[in-house]
Image (cartoon, rainbow, N blue to C red):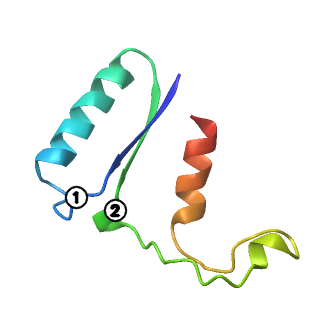
């Protein structure tokens, strides 16, 4: 089983992060592969509506952390 945890709290060490990490730790102890993402520590840029994702090689031109997050979501 694969599980992705995501926290959007601006406090990377806050209560929300603790809850997400505790849940993921329990899942890991039961054999799950887990990923944990915290929005405060990620470089996430908004869409530019350039439609590059709809043409060429169908990839976004924005170079941020979204491809890593997307990969973990697809694996989960």
The tag earlier along the polypeptide, 1 or 2, is: 1
**Picture coordinates of residue 63, whole percent (x, y):** 59, 78
Hey, which residue is sitting farthest right in the picture?
56
Snapshot quadrant of residue 57: bottom right
Q: Residue at x 29, y 22 (%)?
A: 26
Q: Residue at x 56, y 57 (%)?
A: 68
The residue pinned by badge 1 equals 9
Q: Residue at x 34, y 19 (%)?
A: 29
**Picture coordinates of residue 54, whole percent (x, y):** 81, 71
Q: How crowded is mark 1: few (under 14 residues within 10 Å), some or many (20 or more)?
A: some
Q: Indicate left or right for 76 with 49 as reference.
A: left
**Picture coordinates of residue 11, whole percent (x, y):** 16, 61
Q: Residues within 10 Å of mark 2 (few under 14, many from 20)?
A: some
Q: Residue 41 carries which label?
A: none
Q: Which residue is more in the foreground, 41 or 56?
A: 56
Q: Which residue is drawn at 53% across and 22% down?
A: 1
> Where 11 falls versus 57 (above or below)?
above
Circles 1 and 2 in contact, beta carbons < 8 Å: yes
> SS class of the residue under badge 2?
helix
Q: Indicate left or right for 13 with 66 as reference.
A: left
Hey, which residue is sitting farthest left in the picture?
15
**Picture coordinates of residue 53, whole percent (x, y):** 76, 71
> Where 66 falls versus 33 (above or below)?
below
Q: Residue 39 carries which label?
A: 2
> SS class of the residue under badge 1?
loop
Q: Indicate left or right for 34 with 9 as reference.
A: right
Distance (Cα) linking label 1 and label 2: 7 Å
Hey, which residue is sitting farthest top in the picture?
30
Q: In which quarter of the image is the C terminus?
A: top right
């Amino acid at each position: 089983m694969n599980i992705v945890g995501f926290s959007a709290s601006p406090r990377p060490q806050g209560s929300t992060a603790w809850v997400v990490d505790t849940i993921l730790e329990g899942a890991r102890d039961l054999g799950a592969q887990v990923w944990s993402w915290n929005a405060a520590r990620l470089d996430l840029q908004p869409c530019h509506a350039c439609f590059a994702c709809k043409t060429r090689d169908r990839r976004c031109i924005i170079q941020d952390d979204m491809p890593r997050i997307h990969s973990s979501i697809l694996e989960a």
